[in-house]
Image: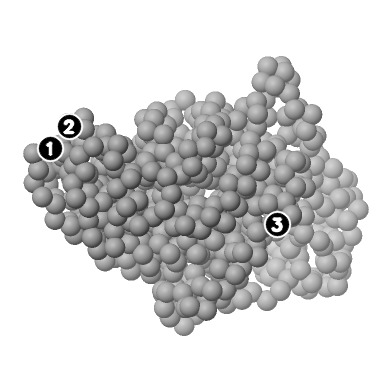
Amino acid sequence: MKTKHFIFIAVICLSTNLAQATTSKSGIKWVGWSEDIFRTAQKENKLVILDLEAIWCHWCHVMDAKTYSDPKVAEIMKAHYIAIKVDQDSRPDLSNRYEEYGWPATIIFSPTGQELVKHSGYIASEQMISLLEAVVKDPTPGPSITPTKAVAVAENALLTKDQRAQLSQDYVEQYDTKYGGWDFGHKFLQADSVEWALSENARGNEDLGKKANDTLKLAAKLIDPAWGGIYQYSAEGWDEPHFEKIMSYQGDALRIYSLAYAQTKNQEYLKNAQAVRTFLKNFLTSPEGAFYTSQNADLVDGEHSGEYFKLGDKERRAKGTPRVDKNSYGRENGWAISGMVALSIATGDSAPLKEAIKAAEWIQKNRALPNGGFRHDTKDGKRLYLGDSLYMASAFLQIYAATADRKWLKSAENTGDFVRNHFTFKDAAGKTGGFITGENPSAKLFAPLPQRDENVAAARFFNLLHHYTGSKTAKEASDQAMRYLASPNPLAVSPASSILIADYETTHAPLHLTIVGSKKDTNATALFVKAAAYPSSYKRIEWLDRNEGALPNPDVTYPTLDKAAAFICSNNRCSRPIYNPDEVLAQIRKIAGLPGRS
């Protein structure tokens, strides 16, 4: 098939999660995704078109209202296609498979499931008619279809010296010297890149510290001044936001602005983090305390809402409120919980932590699977997704770091075991490396593959879990994720910062902070809060109350004292006992050999 090679347009769109067939006003019969569809397609000798959308987005609304409502488009589709409509948030396996195409993503398949066309973004009626007719005339792969690169995992869990150097160079080159921020084109808060810059700044790199601070100040333009929350991105520079508010961006903004506040004490960063929390509380929190998924970009589907979002709270509410996706997915709750915990740790305010724990308990009650895992939603059938269990496991570990309550560490361990048992990937040569994005016993045509961001999260989670517990299986799981990340495919994907972070953490022990004393001792509590607030996303903080027995990983022996004390361990040495909470941060920097303020 010879068709025009379509230009990438990173856009967003509307969808309903269609569990069963529905018929649009134009007569298109939309069905949900199933590999059984291709048996029907072969029987009826029809092509298959997948409209992969997102509930929160503008251009999908436009595509539904204009393109798929066009009688000629509907006529061709009814005659020659089986039409599938899927909300990508509801299907992480499909979302991860086609994420590079943006939303809406339009994929056309042969009756046997071979990809023929992959298109990113809005397609106008005339263009869609031409495309649909061209594929009917010539149902062979077009120029948008390139050979799938086989995943071959690396032999070693460690990056080579050359790989590390190349990533570092890529990271420098990915900084936008014209507009600021990492990556080019659309501007958004690239969380991993800012996190790496903040970490490097803590180790003395002032240039990256300046770039991080410049980026955080620019990204603040994406925070809604009336309701809080952060918009997904800006189309040109930082001044043309698209107004959807997605949980992944809310969680990242909470986490990164909280970390930046802890490091710099810049009140604007605290204000930004609190604005995101306010939005989550007011718009994306269920009555039971779980977190919803997103808020729509449009007040009226398909109509640009720029003027609406210029209004204040009262004026907006008089016109109505953009629709909220009230699904409470395991993955999205993991993101939100981790962000809330980061804010609580950075400020010492227990309220965000309480909100995080309430959501975690709801997920445990309503999304739990046997043996420690979590489902995405209540309607998943036999499908399991890595993200739901992985990000909840990470959230449990963050709650443990903030509370020293060992039940949360146990939950993290149990869910980590579930991840290892259900999502391990082996390449064609039989080598184990990485974790697949989903598990579906019936997935034969579209076997799930590893996804880069999830494996970065897995490497980081399992590595930190290993340090907290001493578990060899956790270390092996971290190495497993790194063998995938050290292979050619993920190394070539932006941003470089993600793998740099995972590489650093898996080759360095975290700063180890331990409070020794009774949990009923107010001074021990003050020491714990101060130690937890140390501005690092990579630290191991524990509380040894001898009434609870030894620590889960008793790799350091602490003296028995007559009063509560903090100990700081780094580079194979530990501090003297610290009794005064006001001395904790200064002693951390001294022991760790770090520059900067205390």
Please give the name of the residue rendered at 60% of the width and 44% of the height, measured from the top-left corner: 216
* Residue 575 % position (x, y): 22, 52
Q: Which mark is residue 85?
A: none
Please give the name of the residue rendered at 49% of the width and 42% of the height, measured from the top-left corner: 264
Q: CA distance from mark 1 to mark 2?
A: 9 Å
Q: Earlier in the sequence, mark 2 or mark 3?
A: 3
Q: Earlier in the sequence, mark 1 or mark 2?
A: 2
Quarter of the rendering containing residue 225: top right
Say if mark 2 contacts mark 3, CB within 8 Å: no
* Residue 232 % position (x, y): 65, 43
Answer left or right for 448 relative to 510. Answer: right
Front in this rendered view, residue 480 or 270? 270
Q: Earlier in the sequence, mark 1 or mark 3?
A: 3
* Residue 587 % position (x, y): 29, 48
Answer left or right for 151 relative to 101. Answer: left
Say if mark 1 contacts mark 2, CB within 8 Å: yes
Q: Which mark is residue 177?
A: 3
Q: CA distance from mark 1 to mark 3?
A: 53 Å
Location of the N terminus (image quadrant): bottom right
What kind of residue is marked 3? Thr
Q: In what element is the residue under mark 1?
A: loop
* Residue 545 % position (x, y): 15, 42
Q: Which mark is residue 521?
A: 2
Q: Is residue 437 above or below residue 262?
A: below
Q: In what element is the residue under mark 2?
A: loop
What kind of residue is marked 2? Asp
Q: Which mark is residue 563?
A: 1
Quarter of the rendering containing residue 298: top right
The crowding category of the residue bearing disc 3, from other C-alpha atoms within 10 Å (few below 14, some 14 to 19, many at least 20), is: few
What kind of residue is marked 1? Lys
Answer left or right for 533 relative to 20. Answer: left
